Image (tube, rainbow, N blue to C red):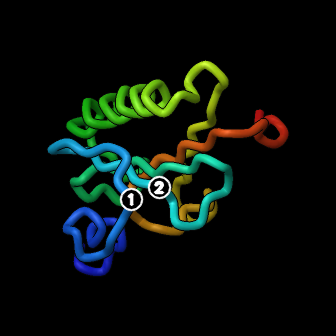
Amino acid sequence: MEDCIFCKIIKGEIPSTKVYEDDEILAFNDVNPAAPIHILVIPKRHISSLADMKPEDEKLVGKIYGVINKIAEEKGFKDEGFRVIVNCGKNGGQEVMHLHFHILAGKQLGEKIV
């Protein structure tokens, strides 16, 4: 999508501080962090949200969770713990309509959500 900020980051039109990249996935530091460590993990293929996933996207989303675990280990916060958040749609708090996973770590996070 031409007006998608994350697609522009993937294309290199907007700079980012990359944490991980392969042919299908990009992870980078959030420019407005909500925790000492706040990393966004996105598929390079534009998928608007979790609600727009197709069956063929399931393998990619599984791979994203593997990448999240790898990042947590490489960055040294796997053992202390971290939170992964996926907002879905307007009422779910999704601001950028490109599927993305927030990794939050580096401090004791707020109250339990569930």
Of the residues shown, which amino acid type is indicated by label 2? Asn
Q: Is residue 56 left or right of residue 64?
A: left
Quarter of the image that includes the N terminus: bottom left
Asked if the residue under mark 2 is in contact with the one under mark 1, i.e. CB atoms within 8 Å, the reply is yes
Residue 3 at x, y = what percent? 30, 80
Q: Residue at x 66, y 24 (%)?
A: 80
Of the residues shown, which amino acid type is indicated by label 1? Thr
Mark 2 lies on residue: 29
Mark 1 lies on residue: 17
Q: Secondary structure at mark 2?
A: strand
Above or below 97: residue 66: above
The 10 Å Cα crowd at callout 2, few under 14, some 14 to 19, many 20 or more, is: some
In front: 33, or 53?
A: 33
Quadrant assignment, res 66: top left
Q: Secondary structure at mark 1?
A: loop
Residue 50 at x, y = what percent? 42, 48
Residue 57 at x, y = what percent? 26, 39
